[in-house]
Image (tube, rainbow, N blue to C red):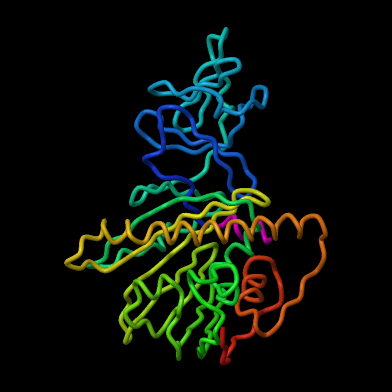
Amino acid sequence: MNITRLKQYWYPIMEEKKLRHTPSAKKLLGIPLVIGRINGAIVCFEDRCPHRNVPLSHGTITHKHLRCGYHGWEFEASGKLNRITGCNSCPDTIHLKSYQIHCDHGIIWVLLEGDSAFENPFSVLKGWKSSVHTRVIKADFIHAIENFLDPTHTPFIHKGLLRQESHQRMLITQACDEQGFTTYYTLLDRQNGLINRLFDQGIDENIASFHLPGYALIEYRQAKKSVFQVAIFFVPIDKGEVSMVIRVSLPKTIIPSTFKFLLLKPFMELAFRQDKLILEQQYITHRQQKTPYIITHADLVIDHLLYLLADGEKGNEKTIAMAL
C-alpha cells in the first residue's frame, strides 16, 4: 500500500462512548496510538513514553495529565512534559508526538500527517435513520474493500442468503476519478436470496462507490429512489488487521426504525461472519504463499483499488453485461 499517501487522510478510530477514564490503545497504519480525555479534551499521542519507550496506554489519566505507568512521568493535554518523579523541574523540549483529532456524531477521527480539512463521508440523509457498528477482522485492507464492493462472490460465500447461483442478469457501468470510483448495476432480474425474498419490494438498481482512503457505500434503489444503504469505512489498523465502521441506513416509515434494524441484524451478522471467514482464509494463504493472483475482466473493482491504494496501473472503466 502507499502508506505515505494514506497517512494524509482522516480515519474513524473509535466510538467516543467507548472512551473511558483510562488511556485507550489503538493502531492506525501500524502506528501505535494512545487516546484519552485529559482536562475535558480528547487527545491522541504516539503510544510511547520518551523516557523508556513504555506504552502510555498502560498508564493512567489524572484530571489534567496522562501519567506513564513505569516512572510516573506526566504529560499535559498539549503533550508537554509536566512532571518527572524526583525532579523539581522538567526540560521544556520534551513533548509527546501528537496527532490531530476530531469528534463528529459520536466517532473519534484521527489524522496522522498533513493538514487536510475534516469531512465526514457518513452523510446524514434527511428523513433517514442509521445504526452504527464497529467490527475488526484479520484480513488484507484492499481485499476487504474488494469483498464488499464486488458482487461476484455472493452466489457462493452468501449462497441462499444474498443470492442463488441462477444467472441473475445485470448491466454494469463505471465512472472513476483520482479519489475513487462508482459502479452502477442495473438489475434485469430480481436478486433471489433470502434477504431479498423477505425485505426487497422491487430493488432494480445498485450503486456501489469507493472514496479514498477507505469509504465504501452500497445504495439500493427502486424506481430511482434510494430505499436502503450500507456504508463501511475500512480502517487499516496494521498489516493483516482491518477495522470496519459500519453504518446501515433506512428511510423512516410508520414502522419504527429500531424494529426494522432488529429484524435485519441477524441476517447482516450472518453475512459478516461469512465474509470474515473467507477473508481470513485468503489472507493466511496469500501471506504464506506470496503467489501472484489472476485478474480478469470479471473482477470489477480490484484494478481500481490497486491503482488508488497501492500505486498499481490505472484501472479500466467497465461497461459489461453479467449474470450471477
Q: Is residue 156 above or below residue 108?
A: below
Q: Is 206 on the left-hand or right-hand side of 51?
A: left
Q: Is residue 119 above or below residue 184?
A: above
Say if the magenta span includes residue 211.
no
List x then y, in percent, for residue 178.
Answer: 57, 75
Q: Is residue 140 above or below residue 106?
A: below
Residue at 57% x, 75% y: name it: 155
Quadrant in the rendering for residue 253: bottom left
List x then y, in percent, for residue 37.
Answer: 40, 32
Quadrant in the rendering for residue 96: top right
Image quadrant holding the N terminus, namely bottom right
Q: Is 128 on the left-hand or right-hand side of 75?
A: left
Question: Which residue is at the front of the view, 31 or 5?
Answer: 31
Q: Is residue 59 above or below residue 205?
A: above
List x then y, in percent, for residue 265.
Answer: 38, 57
Task: Please report the bounds of the magenta region as a residue range.
Answer: 1-8
Residue at 64% x, 59% y: name it: 279
Instruction: Please give the count of numbered marks on the rendered protein.
Output: 0
Q: Is 315 on the left-hand or right-hand side of 68?
A: right
List x then y, in percent, for residue 180.
Answer: 54, 73
Question: Which residue is at the front of the view, 73 or 282?
Answer: 282
